[in-house]
Structure formats: structure tokens, C-alpha cells
Amino acid sequence: MSADPKDRLAKMANEIAAFFATQPAAEALPGMVQHLRDFWTPKMRADFLELAAAGGRELSPLASKAAAALRPSTAGKR
């Protein structure tokens, strides 16, 4: 097993995505995002976003979409 904590986060995110992928399509992404908000620490979420921003090739499509949905919005900020 890799010593890189981000590899572990990718594995965890993909496992969560695999669960939510079994849900109806309209519920999968919001369910995964809410799960990450509810159960992952801010540090875990920040590392996950960093992993996704770096390409996130190891992330499943749903995990990648969840990362995009978790990114803070820059709308209205200057």
C-alpha cells in the first residue's frame, strides 16, 4: 500500500462513489457531496480537492464530479 495519504483519499473517494453510483442518478452526486461534507474533515476535503486539481486520474468519474461540486464558488468574489 502506498504511503501517500492522497492515494488513500482517492481510494476512499472511489469507494464512496461506488456506493452512491448505485443510487438514482439525480441522487448520486448530491449524496456523495453531502457525505464528504458530513464525514470528512476540512483537511481531508482540501487534500481531495488538491488531488482532483492535479489531474485526479485515479478518481472515478463520480468522485471527480464531487470534487468539482465541493470547490468553493468564486462567483461574486473579487
Image (cartoon, helix red, strand yellow):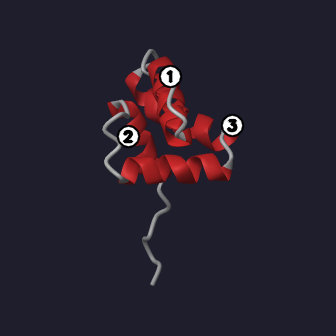
Judge depth for marks 1 and 3 and give the one in front.
Answer: 1
Is residue 27 something that shows in the picture? Answer: no
For label 1, the crowd category at 10 Å Cα-Cα, with few meaning under 14, some 14 to 19 and many 20 or more, is: some
**Labelled pair 3, 2 in contact (Cβ < 8 Å):** no
How many residues crowd around disc 3 within 10 Å: few (fewer than 14), some, or many (20 or more)?
A: few
Q: Which residue is mark 2?
A: 64
Q: How many marks?
A: 3
Residue beneath label 1, please?
15
Query: Element under label 3?
Result: helix
45 is higher (above) or lower (below) than 58: below
Residue at the spot x=35%, y=52% of the render? 54
- Residue 31 position in % (x across, y down): 54, 31
Q: Can you give x and y, in whole percent of width and height, for residue 6 in the image?
A: 51, 41
Contact, CB < 8 Å: mark 1 with mark 2? Answer: no
Q: Amino acid at mark 1?
A: Glu
**Amino acid type, label 2:** Ser
Tag 2's secondary structure? helix
Q: Which residue is mark 3?
A: 39
Query: What SS does tag 1 mark?
Result: helix
The reply to whether the C-beta atoms of the residues labelled 1 and 3 are less than 8 Å apart is no
